[in-house]
Image (tube, rainbow, N blue to C red):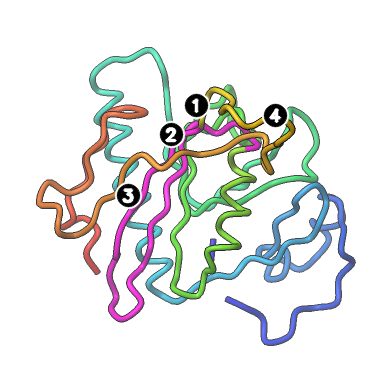
Amino acid sequence: MSAEFAVQPELPAFMTWEELERLPEEIAGEIELWDRRVVWVRRGPAEHSIFTARMWNSFERCVRDHAATGPDECWRAGLEINVFFGRTGKNSFLTPDFLIHRCLDRPYQDVRAEDVLLAGEVLSPSNSSREMEIKRARYASGGIPWYWEVHLHRETSAIEFVRAYALETRVGRLPDGVQPRYRSNYLFVNEWTPDDEDGIRINFPFPISIPWSDLEY
């Protein structure tokens, strides 16, 4: 997720979900909790909302097309839904711009990281590579198999490129005594730009086909 308050309200560095729920919605909606640590998120310009909605629409169509083939699994495309880490508790969560999660057992149920097949973020030019590296690692720590980034063009109202990352399933080999900074990691597996005439096409985690005409401003 990528608007900033001119001055952020004075809040403690750490909060619980129950404390967050007592805040006004316009404030609470701009916060994620990372192991109870308050993390302000920036909601970007109009283009951010527009391209987030278009990615969600495209994924919803792909999910419906996949369901029509009769597979046993059931998936839903979601838009800006809180994803809670761990099997219980709500003090650690992220809010991806778009996601695909398994169909839940009953209505109004919380979405847990273990329910999520794919999480994605739409990145405005103001998003730094450092902050996205940290957020990417958070998604990986939740064991979410796929992570996508939609990078918006700096000069025009358009997508510059889309990247797909897959969760590494084995621990890489490192020299003796060297430990990885993060226990889980995503590997970059594909990139698409508007120059790709076939649009966005990939067969994992299920067949996804998105023509660029569906994503144009």
Question: 86 or 189: nearer the eye?
Answer: 189
Tell which circle, 3 or 4, labels the residue nearer the N-terminal end: 3
Distance from label 2 to label 1 (Cα)? 6 Å
Question: Which residue is under mark 2?
Answer: 76
Q: CA distance from mark 3 to mark 2?
A: 11 Å
Q: Secondary structure at mark 2?
A: strand
Q: Position of residue 22 (x, y in %)?
A: 83, 60
Left or right placement of residue 90 versus residue 136 in this view: right
CB contact under 8 Å: marks 4 and 2: no
> For this view, does 158 lie left or right of residue 148?
left
Report which residue position mark 1 lands on.
103
- Asked whether disc 4 touches disc 1, contact meaning CB atoms under 8 Å apart, the reply is no
Mark 3 — residue?
57
The local crowd at label 4, few if under 14, some if 14 to 19, many if 20 or more residues have their Cα within 10 Å, is few
Q: Residue at x 60, y 53 (%)?
A: 135
Q: Amino acid at mark 4?
A: Asp
Q: Earlier in the sequence, mark 1 or mark 3?
A: 3
> Do the residues under discs 2 and 1 have CB atoms within 8 angstroms?
yes
Which is closer to the viewer, label 3 or label 4?
Answer: 4
Looking at the rendered structure, the kind of residue marked 2 is Arg
Residue 159 on the magenta span? yes
- Taking the magenta stretch, the answer to whether it contains residue 161 is yes
